[in-house]
Image (cartoon, helix red, strand yellow):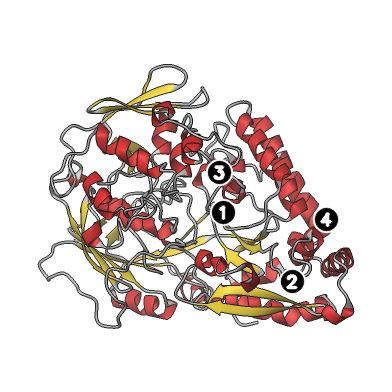
């Protein structure tokens, strides 16, 4: 089978991504007004005397600069340039690791007692329009991120990221089933102490100052400008246009978001007034929006972008290039399964889900379709646990190996056509499907520009009629101009399978957290299949994470076994990232650093 195109790296993995955020490839389901129309004209570029110009790209446009709500991983790019955080990671002196530097916070978090921490804020910090940033700014931001009316989709990253904020979830969800009817803001563990000090109250003891810093090291844990937010809030308080374009946004970062030609180019200019301005070397940053791989290759070869993540069709041309780099990932690509399609008589059957799991040749997909990826019949990624105190990854532990051995006993990475057919027959019998209802047509929805997942769909269209003896086949349903989340929201009858790729960087410390996005408690989850037993075991792991690491690994094994028993979704490939850098780029680190990346925003251009 000929190799197909694949978009290997999304924006969260790009050169200029400072934070290893829990990235995902989902785009927001709420589409704001767009700052300009898409066009095919030549993008606006800075004048020739603009100094050092860094040129890079995104594979898709950023839908919104409302970082409290935007779930799209590529939002990391404008967030890292145009916004400041409490603290930021920064390359150490010899480029072998990273250190923490102050940004909007000053000094390390101060521990008051087992549950309370104070954060001192930078006096004199301002928005790019000159307005002050202080404790009131942060408290207002926290209130909006947890606003019960707005239901910001990144709220969980404030109240339950590295640590859990006291009564944060209860405040957000007040009045909902299973939550208190009313929770007062003063009962939430986010408080102003004075004009430049805030206090955090956690639900558990045992955290460190580094844990507090990591909690705020995320694209969404940035402040919002109160005046602009209030101007953008609807009269009923249910929606906001904040960040929909540059006229509805105020930045506070090391760069000013200067130009936004939607679906064409983003241009950032260095903010010389920023308190950390000396740490940034680029005068201008151009971020082109380039969905097509062929166009990206052409731009790279012409020197119009300075890095390139090749796909399965182009990687062979570069695999031996001395500029090529490769590194691991917390991402395991997977396929969501709709269990609520009213037109699919077996959609609610676990046997149906198991049939799909065993009917995919992951070795072939990883090599011939996705190109130099690693097949994966399990979901906990290969980096999970590497930043734990023992540095033992879950996959290398006896517990992770036991799950891998179980999967291999079924067949190579779980692929077993005979088992697939057997489970399908069980599902048909269980759901009383008659011959007249056959074949079952499974709708495989994909973004029409995602050529790798399309290639997989085409392969399954050929294979499944044989594997399933004509009882089940696959239909490719393409969509365009919207996210997978948007498409799924059009109706449960529109889809059965949906390719996906969500990653959680915290799994490098706590392996079980890679499953966080698929819990019933996560409002933005990409799947609609909820298993109380699975959710309960996740909580067992949460309770164990502050204790003995070996016990956490043991409980994570039970969680992954439940994941496979119920087929929460279907794992496909362990992502391996490949990237080339142009010769003129001077990177600030010697190698890719997990949890930090290449630190490209702090890079330079060769003289």
Q: Nearer the viewer, mark 3 or mark 4?
A: 3
Of the residues under marks 4 and 1, which one precedes in the sequence? 4
10 Å crowding of disc 2: few (<14), some (14-19), many (20+): some
Please tell me which of labels 2 and 4 falls first in the chain.
2
Q: Is residue 225 above or below residue 321?
A: above
Q: Residue 507: which disc?
A: 3
Residues at marks 4 and 1, CA–CA distance in whole angstroms: 31 Å
| Front-most of residues 127 and 437 | 437
As drawn, 556 above or below 603: above
- Could you say where residue 78 lies in the image, as x and y percent from the top left? 31, 57
Mark 3 surroundings: few (<14), some (14-19) or many (≥20) residues within 10 A: many
Per the model, the C-alpha gap separating discs 1 and 3 is 17 Å
Residue 10 can be seen in this image:
yes
* Mark number, residue 525: 1
For the N terminus, give its image quadrant: bottom right
Residue under label 4: 409
Residue at 43% x, 57% y is 73
């Amino acid at each position: 089978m000929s190799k197909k195109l694949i978009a290997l790296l999304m924006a969260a993995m790009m050169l200029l991504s400072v934070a290893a955020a829990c990235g995902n490839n989902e785009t927001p389901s709420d589409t704001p007004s767009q700052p300009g129309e898409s066009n095919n004209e030549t993008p606006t570029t800075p004048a020739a005397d603009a100094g050092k110009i860094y040129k890079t790209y995104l594979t898709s446009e950023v839908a919104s600069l409302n970082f409290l709500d935007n779930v799209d991983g590529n939002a990391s790019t404008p967030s890292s340039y145009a916004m400041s955080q409490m603290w930021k990671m920064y390359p150490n002196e010899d480029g072998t690791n990273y250190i923490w530097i102050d940004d909007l916070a000053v000094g390390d978090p101060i521990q008051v007692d087992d549950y309370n921490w104070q954060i001192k804020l930078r006096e004199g910090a301002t928005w790019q329009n000159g307005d002050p940033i202080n404790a009131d700014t942060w408290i207002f931001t926290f209130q909006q991120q947890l606003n019960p009316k707005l239901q910001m989709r990144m709220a969980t990253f404030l109240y339950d990221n590295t640590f859990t904020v006291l009564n944060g979830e209860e405040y957000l969800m007040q009045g909902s089933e299973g939550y208190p009817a009313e929770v007062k803001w003063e009962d939430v563990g986010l408080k102003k102490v004075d004009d430049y000090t805030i206090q955090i109250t956690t639900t558990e003891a045992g955290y460190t100052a580094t844990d507090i810093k990591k909690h705020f090291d995320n694209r969404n844990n940035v402040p919002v400008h109160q005046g602009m937010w209030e101007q953008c809030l609807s009269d009923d308080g249910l929606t906001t246009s904040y960040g929909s374009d540059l006229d509805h946004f105020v930045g506070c970062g090391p760069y000013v978001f200067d130009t936004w030609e939607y679906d064409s180019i983003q241009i950032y200019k260095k903010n010389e007034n920023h308190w950390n301005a000396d740490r940034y070397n680029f005068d201008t940053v151009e971020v082109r929006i380039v969905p097509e791989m062929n166009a990206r290759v052409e731009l790279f070869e012409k020197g119009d972008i300075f890095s390139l993540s090749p796909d399965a069709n182009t990687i062979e041309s570069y695999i031996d290039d001395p500029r090529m780099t490769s590194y691991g990932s917390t991402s395991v690509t997977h396929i969501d399964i709709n269990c609520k399609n009213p037109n699919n008589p077996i959609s609610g059957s676990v046997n149906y889900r198991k049939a799909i799991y065993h009917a995919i040749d992951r070795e072939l997909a990883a090599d011939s379709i996705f190109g130099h990826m690693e097949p994966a019949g399990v979901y906990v990624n290969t980096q999970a646990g590497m930043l734990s105190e023992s540095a033992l990854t879950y996959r290398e532990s006896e517990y992770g190996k036991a799950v891998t051995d179980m999967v291999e006993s079924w067949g190579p990475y779980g692929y077993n056509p005979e088992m697939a057919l057997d489970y399908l027959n069980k599902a048909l019998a269980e759901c009383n499907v008659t011959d007249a209802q056959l074949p079952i047509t499974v709708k495989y929805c994909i973004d029409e520009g995602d050529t790798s997942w399309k290639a997989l769909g085409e392969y399954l269209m050929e294979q499944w009629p044989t594997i399933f003896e004509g009882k089940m086949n696959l239909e490719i349903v393409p969509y365009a101009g919207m996210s997978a989340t948007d498409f799924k929201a059009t109706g449960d009858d529109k889809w059965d399978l949906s390719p996906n790729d969500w990653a959680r960087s915290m799994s490098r410390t706590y392996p079980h957290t890679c499953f966080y996005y698929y819990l019933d408690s996560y409002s933005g989850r990409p799947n609609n299949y909820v298993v109380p037993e699975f959710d309960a075991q996740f909580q067992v792991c949460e309770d164990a994470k502050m204790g003995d690491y070996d016990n956490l690994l043991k409980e994570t094994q039970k969680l992954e076994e439940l994941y496979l028993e119920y087929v929460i979704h279907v794992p496909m490939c362990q992502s391996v990232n490949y990237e080339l850098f142009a010769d003129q780029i001077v990177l600030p680190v010697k190698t890719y650093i997990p949890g930090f990346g290449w630190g490209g925003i702090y890079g330079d251009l060769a003289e």
